[in-house]
Amino acid sequence: MTMTAAYRRQRVIGAVVGWAAGDALGAPFEFGPSGRFSRRFPRPACGSATEMVGGRGWLPGEWTDDTQMGLLVAYSLLDHDGLDEADIYHRFVTWLRAGPADVGSQTRAVLGSGLPFDGAAKAYFDSGRLAAGNGSLMRTIPAAIYWSQQNVEASGDAARRISGLTHGDPAAGDGCAIYHRLIAAALDGRDPLDALPGALADIPEERRDRWVEVCDPTWAPEKATEPNGAVWPTLGTALWALRSQATFADALRMVVDCGGDTDTIAAVAGGLLGAVQGIQAVPSRWATPLNGRLPGHPGAAPDLVGLMALAQRLDGEPTDLDEPGPEAGIDPVEVDPGLWLSDFYGATSAPPGALVISLCRTWGRLDHLERRQVYLTDNAENLDVDMVIDDVLAMIAAGQAEHRPVLVHCYGGHSRTGLILRAYLMRRHGLSVQQATERAQRLWPHLGLWEPTFDHALQRLAP
């Protein structure tokens, strides 16, 4: 795989996981006042209790109808090798009849009308009711990825058609078409803000001014002229978060703190930020516990690994989930008070009550109650090693502050595990890269030092 392809993969996965994570993060705070998230979590919660708290009927890390409907779109696109509007609509109706925990009022009315797929949303709009909600934008990430490598006309047409299944107001389709353009640019490694002028130029003139307003760099959520359940401020909030140049975690905190329709604005912003910054920017404490259901479609709801594989399939990339054969493991070793290391197989024997941080795929073999799944490849193809190091060190520190063992492992226990050990020694004990490497070699004889980009990241970490 080329470096460009590897980076694209991480952005594609980041878009899907960031979308679902934003949805689950914002769900407990929906319809609440502004600032509620930061009042509850004045600082990052990296230990056993994280910001994925659940509530309002949702389990910790559980996604809502935003992700559920997007997954239905994704499976239809893959099963039919493209857009089949009747099939997507049928899946939506089946889902609604199975009684999902949350459904937007407009979506419920359209899908429950009994009208055909090509007339229900139009009838709702023609009745004079407000129909420019964000309920079609919230589910757009899978389709945006699927069409991201096709021409903008085909992508925009698909965005509008899928939006129009439930939202008859063409403004809702405008928002989805713009979002498709932004995501396509981000996945290519381009600045999505550079794609805005072309996207806005494609909006019919009679509707363009309103979009120009919320897409302007000076726009902020407090300038919204309607609640953020409408499509315009939802997309405007995602762009506002992107322009903040904050980390994924800080940007999502800003978005959820806006209050109102927090799950949807965080899902839309999370998908865009994930596409720009990649999966390594999504905190593992938010990504690992992702879970959910698909009412009416049993067995179809994926976990984190399933979301990652689905993202790759949407981008036309085959997935390799083959499980390796059994090997003799490296038993866990306590290398510093509270910090344990092992390889993948040794991690199955983690100390009781340990927080297990996995730097490789685990193939479902680790069932620890407290685990964090980190995306880190054992080569030069990482989009942001620095962010991974910060994420893991924060979790180690939080676990140690709770006086519980923390076990870090990768597949072989060599290079990636060694990177974290060296970074830990530098930050915990104030060592230089060389000093940390020398001590790590004494503490962990399995240390692997073959990846130069890991050394470069440690140099950036040095005081």
Image (cartoon, rainbow, N blue to C red):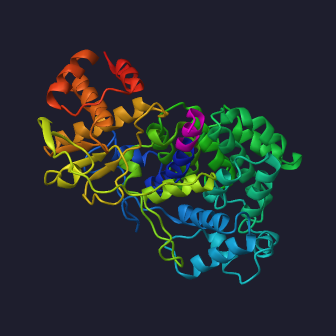
Find residue 347 and report its horizontal and vertical position in percent: 22, 50
Find residue 333 and report its horizontal and vertical position in percent: 14, 41
> Image quadrant of residue 73?
bottom right
Task: Tell me what residue is drawn at x 50 percent, y 64 percent.
Answer: 64
**Could you say which is closer to the camera, residue 72 or residue 120?**
72
> Is 421 on the left or on the right of 258, as rendered?
left
> Is 399 on the left or on the right of 223, as rendered?
left
**Range covered by the magenta-colored residues:** 1-10
> Is 6 on the left or on the right of 370, as rendered?
right
Task: Tell me what residue is drawn at x 46 percent, y 70 percent.
Answer: 293
Q: In the rendered view, would you say 264 is above or below 425?
A: below
**Could you say which is closer to the camera, residue 376 or residue 181?**
376
In this view of the protein, can residue 314 be seen by the observer?
yes
- Residue reaching furthest to the right: 205
Q: In the rendered view, would you say 222 is above or below 352?
A: above
Q: In the rendered view, would you say 128 is above or below 170?
A: below
Instruction: Report the magenta stretch's main SS.
Output: helix
**Could you say which is closer to the camera, residue 380 or residue 120?**
380
Task: Tell me what residue is drawn at x 45 percent, y 37 percent.
Answer: 250
Find residue 141 and report its horizontal and vertical position in percent: 62, 53
Q: Is residue 306 magenta?
A: no
> Is 30 on the left or on the right of 104, as rendered?
left
Q: In the rendered view, would you say 321 is above or below 103?
A: above
Q: Split into 4 quadrants, where in the image is the C terminus?
A: top left
Q: Split into 4 quadrants, where in the image is the N terminus?
A: top right
Q: Is residue 9 magenta?
A: yes
